[in-house]
Image (spheres, rainbow, N blue to C red):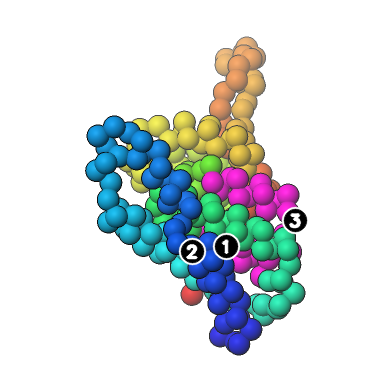
Amino acid sequence: MNEELELVKLELENTNDMIDVKRNPVIESLLSPIKKIPYIGPLLNTAVELKMSEFQRQKENELIDVIMQNKYAVTSEMVNDVEFIINYNRTLEAVRRLATGDKVKFFGNLIKNGYLAGKNIENSQFEEYLNILSSLSYREIEYLTDFLLEASNKGGKIMDESWNAFISKMNSKYNIKNILFWYKRLEATGFIREIVSSSEIMGNALVLEDKSKGYEADDSLFEFYELVLKRDEK
């Protein structure tokens, strides 16, 4: 790792240390409401705060590790940009509020590929992606990824029998009864949309009805995948 990259890593770690002076404000904000609950609050002790602090530190270190997995040359201009500094801290705040560490790599990818990969993401797009990552569960992100990888081999669409087979496979993979519910919910992201047939021939009659035939990926999902969801190839 070159010297300038090491300096970038040190700066990120120093930012975390400055925020953590005396007491992590995120930990305090999480514990404060619980401390007010009668009979429960008094049961909290210093060990809980220490455990939470260690958990936060693990997530922060993982975020930095993901960001530093960068094959491009990082310059001082990139990291001294005001927009980068503000959005890095917004990302760090989002990571600190995660109940588990499973989505940290996606937040790291957003910073790494958005700012340190030779191009500068538009701030509006960064905000949109940050909000999407914060609102989706890890499993919902997996649903999107599975759909995209399957649809990529079918012109961006999964329809008819292929769709039925895909739904059956996903139900089995995640051991749930109706994954279709979650794909309908994921339409709100704008990344996927349902393909509906409004008419079909039955005998000699034309019957008008809405009938789901499958789903297709919006172009934005491919971009989101490349920037945020795609794993680095070892």
Q: Which of 72 and 22 is in front in this view?
A: 22
Residue carrying label 1: 109
Instruction: Identify the element where label 3 is drawn.
Output: loop
Question: What kind of secondary structure does the magenta stretch mostly adopt?
Answer: helix
> Which segment is the magenta one?
105-134
Residue 87 position within the rendered picture, expressed as x and y whole percent measured from the top left: 65, 57
The residue sitting at 60% across, 54% down in the picture is 90
Instruction: Identify the element where label 1 is drawn.
Output: helix
Left or right relative to 226: residue 16 = left
125 part of magenta stretch = yes
Q: In this view, does 158 lie above or below 227?
A: above
Sooner in the amino-acid sequence: mark 3 or mark 2 = 2
The residue sitting at 59% across, 74% down in the picture is 11
The residue sitting at 48% across, 53% down in the picture is 25
Residue carrying label 3: 122
Residue carrying label 2: 21
Residue 70 in sight here = no
Q: Nearer the observer, disc 2 or disc 1?
A: 2
Q: In this view, does 213 lie above or below 19?
A: above
